Amino acid sequence: MFFHSKDLQFNARVTQPDPRFARMLLEAFGGANGELKSAMQYFVQAFSCRNPFPDKYDMLMDIATEELGHLEIVGATIQMLLGPINGKMKDVVEDMAINTMMEGKTAKEDFIHQAFTNPQFLITSPGSPMLTDSNGNPWCATYVTANAELSVDLRSNMAGECRAKIVYEYLIPFTDDPYVKETLGFLMTREVTHFQQFEAALDTIQPNFPPGIFQTNPKYSNLYFNMSKGEDARGPWNEGKSSRLKEEWQYIDNPLEEVENTDGLLNKKIKGSDRTEEQVRKQDEQLAKKRSKEILSATPEKDMKWSKYQNSKKDGKI
């Protein structure tokens, strides 16, 4: 269950309304890399962890809930940046008092110009944020990735935190409001915090590379194909040893010739790796059994119950 505290996690403030920046800030509200996306992603991912990995379930639910708090901070900031729009739009009289309130026609036109960068602030939802990005595109569940494989989901989350962090980094220069910068700085910092938490959780899953269960074929895992003509670049991505498997990179300077000489790589010989295809097959079997046992041993086949309540324990019902 969820409980809502009416106090924000961080005390968001603004010095004065700024409808133009409010539009930009929608990226952090209903955008592809916004707070709602993060909250829903971690929330959905948590379900498959409930039985086999209760510690990861706890972490994902905690961070998902914090992300909802961040969504509230962003929404509150947008609301304050929109200022008095809602109240002024309520006056529907032909010669509305908005002219006086805004100090005449020039101020009114300037106000409308600012807000019209996102018409929904005047027409659809005056003075309030909506679940869209800065261009009015509605939030979409396809932003969420959940594969029910922790080594994959945690890496996806780390990448997501990087994207969310850079969104705030790009937003900060577009506001001169010191209070708003302060809020964005807090939110940006928490993205880095979450990245480290997901990284630490991933490290507790061993082995976790390659992601998932199946290992990679040593015939192809260390090949670098030079697929472009012109000046070639060399670096740790195509020479020396690979970062995780520690295999020697094999630089294929002429991919077409290599493919033709090996019958479409079917006859390619293992080179630069100590692994064999038989070793890989055995590793696949061993890791598959290990992961399966972890999940099955923690998943009851009948009489399943999600929660164990304290009062029920005291009453002897569980």
Image (cartoon, rainbow, N blue to C red):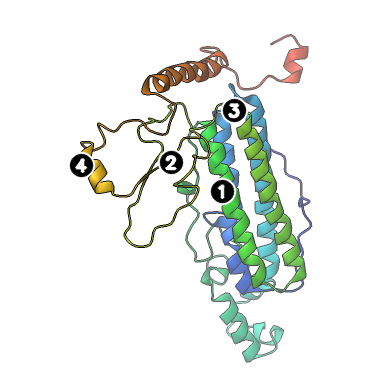
Q: Who comes first in sequence, dot 4 or dot 1? A: 1
Q: Is residue 96 above or below residue 182?
A: below
Image quadrant for the N terminus?
A: top right
Q: Nearer the viewer, mark 3 or mark 4?
A: 4
Regarding residue 69, the answer to whether it shows in the image is no
Q: Quadrant of residue 155?
A: top right
| Dot 1 amino acid type | Gly
Regarding residue 188, the answer to whether it shows in the image is yes
Left or right side of 175 for 52: left
Q: Who comes first in sequence, dot 2 or dot 3? A: 3
In the structure shown, which secondary structural element does the residue marked by tag 2 occupy? Answer: loop
Spatial CA span between label 1 and label 2: 29 Å
Q: Which residue is mark 2?
A: 249
Q: Identify the residue at image location x=57%, y=81%.
A: 113
Q: Are marks 1 and 2 in contact (CB under 8 Å)?
A: no
| Dot 3 amino acid type | Ile
Spatial CA span between label 3 and label 4: 40 Å
Q: Who comes first in sequence, dot 4 or dot 2? A: 2
Spatial CA span between label 3 and label 1: 20 Å
Query: Where's residue 50, x and y in %?
Result: 60, 26
| Mark carried by residue 260 | 4
In the structure shown, which secondary structural element does the residue marked by tag 3 occupy? Answer: loop
Q: Who comes first in sequence, dot 3 or dot 4? A: 3
Q: Nearer the viewer, residue 280 or 120?
A: 280
Q: Identify the residue at image location x=58%, y=33%.
A: 46
Q: Which residue is mark 1?
A: 160
Q: Nearer the viewer, mark 3 or mark 1?
A: 3
Q: Are marks 2 and 3 in contact (CB under 8 Å)?
A: no
Query: Where's residue 215, x and y in %?
Result: 43, 28
Q: Nearer the viewer, mark 1 or mark 2?
A: 2
